[in-house]
Amino acid sequence: MKITSARVIVTCPGRNFVTLKIETDEGLTGVGDATLNGRELAVASYLTDHVIPCLIGRDPHRIEDTWQYLYRGAYWRRGPVTMSAIAAVDTALWDIKAKAAGLPLYQMLGGRSRDGALVYPHANGADIEETVDRVGDFLAKGFKAVRAQCGIPGIATTYGVAHGSKFYEPATKGLPEEQIWSTERYLDFVPKLFARLREVYGFGPHFLHDVHHRLTPIEAARLGKSLEPYRLFWMEDPSPAENQEAFRLIRQHTVTPIAVGEVFNSIHDCRELIQNQLIDYIRTTVVHAGGITHLRRIADLASLYQVRTGSHGATDLSPICMGAALHFDVWVPNFGIQEYMIHAPVTDEVFPHAYTFQDGYMFPGEVPGHGVDIDERLAAEYPYDPAYLPVCRLEDGTLWNW
Ligand SMILES: O=C(O)C(=O)C[C@H](O)[C@H](O)CO
Ligand SMILES: [Mg+2]
């Protein structure tokens, strides 16, 4: 089999997505997600201008060789743009290989380790009682794990909480929105949210929380310690993780489990965190971490240290990433949980998919490939609409981590 053509499709059904479609001389096609929120066109250009010309004529079955060709061959290794572009090629090639075999992708990885993937959605509210209600809505729908984020008294906006009645979506039109942050108010407030959630729902459901990189290591240690009575499933991204060694300090002070990795794109970003057992869950995902081929390498390293997976699954990762991630999740031996932020109906229409949700778990479906496609005619009705992630400042104006 040979790759005869490949193209990038940029579309905005509710939000922007970048998709790579690869076609072969045997009529089989594969699709991969290449979306990098707020920097979409950089990946689109990387693929169109630099990667696609190298794909034509290659054997789509040679996934590992193509991965190495694009990684080593670029000379400029790693980085979110490069690794998202490689991920898109890798995902599309796994899709083609599984379709050629007539099997769902998880069978190509080694078959099922479990029936379905435990998932968590996002519940958020302007205040504690609204957040408690939103958590209750998800529990009533059968979810067994829920992430809870809440407006903080005295701060106009905070990460993960919707403006007004709109569903939470981080990217906004125009130039980046500037938000104000107060660590002191946050640290005092968050334990009250989880105290109330445990009071209302008991210790049956799993609760998760995303700190979104906003604390210093010692502040993160304090938060982890103060949340211990509420037994969180995890505390996510408590501090920026470029300095992997910093997590030793957090770890020394708290037994609240730690999840990190949605902004990582390579095994080298998390090697020390994993090998030193400084985290409990690694959150790298298909689209930003080099596709199935590289994610498998990360998960295998993690498995040696009892670190489990908890892949990023926000709505800025397309349903193609979600589908591929679910095949990975039902196979990977050291699976922990999968984020499932739930796409808008218009996104689901553009990306028809085989995956389903039932009773707190998701199932990748049994169709050959990863089971997600793109309706190109419909996609063309939603042209690219530039949007940025917000930036964050402390109350004195200092630029901070959003
Ligand atoms: O889903 C999460 O855990 C996130 O932190 C979502 C990120 O803010 C989002 O993907 C940024 O594009
Ligand atoms: Mg996060």
Image (spheres, rainbow, N blue to C red):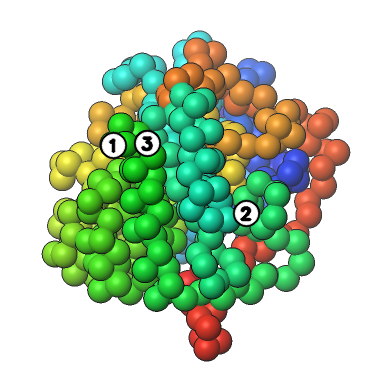
In screen coordinates, is 57 left or right of 400? right
Vertical placement of residue 308 versus 373, above or below: below
Q: Quadrant of residue 40?
A: bottom right
Pair 2/1: label in front: 1
- Residue wearing tag 2: 162
Q: Residue at x 37, y 57 (%)?
A: 192
Compare marks 3 and 2 and give the one earlier in the sequence: 2
Q: Are marks 3 and 2 in contact (CB under 8 Å)?
A: no
- Position of residue 34 measured from the top left corner of the image (x, y, whole percent): 59, 46
In screen coordinates, is 195 left or right of 84? left
Q: Residue at x 39, y 76 (%)?
A: 184
Q: Are marks 2 and 1 in contact (CB under 8 Å)?
A: no
Three-letter residue code for mark 3: Tyr
Q: Mark 3: few, some, or many residues within 10 Å (few <14, many ≥20)?
A: few
Pair 3/2: label in front: 3
Q: Secondary structure at mark 3?
A: helix
- Position of residue 137 measured from the top left corner of the image (x, y, whole percent): 53, 33
Compare marks 2 and 1 and give the one earlier in the sequence: 2
- Regarding residue 26, the answer to whether it shows in the image is yes
- Residue wearing tag 3: 201
Give the CA separation, mark 1 to mark 3.
Answer: 7 Å
Vertical placement of residue 231 versus 329, above or below: below
In-front residue for pair 103/312:
312
In-front residue for pair 146/258:
146
Vertical placement of residue 92 versus 362, above or below: below
Q: Secondary structure at mark 2?
A: loop
Q: Residue at x 44, y 45 (%)?
A: 147
In screen coordinates, is 229 left or right of 338? left
- Residue wearing tag 1: 203
- Position of residue 199 measured from the top left corner of the image (x, y, whole percent): 34, 43
